[in-house]
Amino acid sequence: MADTSLPIEEVTDGNKIFRFRGWKIETQKKAALSTDGRTRLSQDCELPHIPLPEIIFADNFVRITHEESGWTAEFNARDALKLWAQRERQGVPSTIASYDVMYTCEYQGTVAESWKPIATQEELPLAKLREHSTILFYDHVSLFEDDIRDLGEVELTVKIRVMPFGFLLLCRYFARMDDKIVKLRDSRYYHEFGSNVVLRDFELREATTKDLHQFYLQSHFDDPDDHNCFIPTADIMYEHTKPTLRSADSIALRH
């Protein structure tokens, strides 16, 4: 096995592999799903009459692997949409007129069931993560997008960055329906090199567009342009609202 005490990065067509401190991080970016591929995915989701998001990057993924223990977490559009579809099937019978057009997704990645997370009160070291630090590796991968019939936007993305002391992965679902509602779902994975645990947290935020605009204006009252043109973003939502639901757990890396 290669010496991963120093960062090693391999880049091929649409793929990146980064190794450091016993971790292997893989990302892939490919073209959006074809019409035939969408049909097959719709069948896999068992909702053949419900349209899937307009743009699906079904071959895109982010995968993190602890090479010694074999623990792996993967983030991909197929699993995320299957989770959304499962929720649709569990609710009232879905029809073309009643389905969740915002594709509300609480996807936290795909992890083998043999790895049991344990609830924890420990929080991610956000202050440390905000400090300036060398970025050894970074990537931003889109999983799916939709414009809600020109009434807003929906996106599921994954970002990962590796610093000398650890890595942070963010799987983020963001959706806004113009003049109605804004949704944010954040799932974060953090590992500090040298430790034997991965911390994971999940936060849910929701607000009406009107309320979010008011929260925003409270800190931008001196800028007249902000009163006339307001487009909610994921960063604005995160900065100006508190989670309505939060959970945190730790995953022990067995050796």
Image: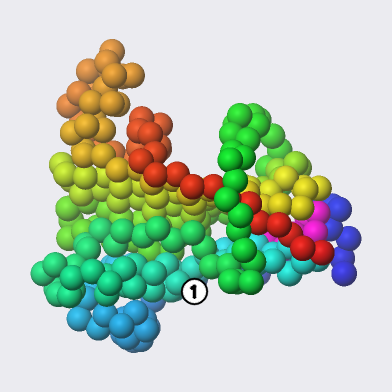
Residue at image location 35% in from the left, 37% down from the top: 237
* Image side of residue 174 versus residue 107, left or right: left
In the image, 13 versus 231, the foreground residue is 231
What residue is pinned by disc 1? 59
Q: Let me know if residue 3 is in the magenta part.
A: no
Residue 131 place in picture, x, y as percent: 64, 29
Identify the image quadrant of the C terminus: bottom right
Question: Dot 1: within a 10 Å radius of its alpha carbon, few (fewer than 14), some, or many (20 or more) residues?
Answer: some
Q: Is residue 166 something one can see in this rendering?
A: yes
- Residue 2, by quadrant, is bottom right
Residue at image location 20% in from the left, 23% down from the top: 227
Which residues fall within the magenta stretch? 20-27
* Vertical position of residue 126 compared to residue 225: above or below: below
At label 1, which amino acid type do we have? Asp
Residue at image location 45% in from the left, 56% down from the top: 157
In the image, 186 versus 31, the foreground residue is 186
Q: Is residue 9 something one can see in this rendering?
A: no
Residue 53 place in picture, x, y as percent: 29, 67
Q: Secondary structure at mark 1?
A: loop
Residue 75 place in picture, x, y as percent: 52, 64
In the image, 159 versus 14, the foreground residue is 159
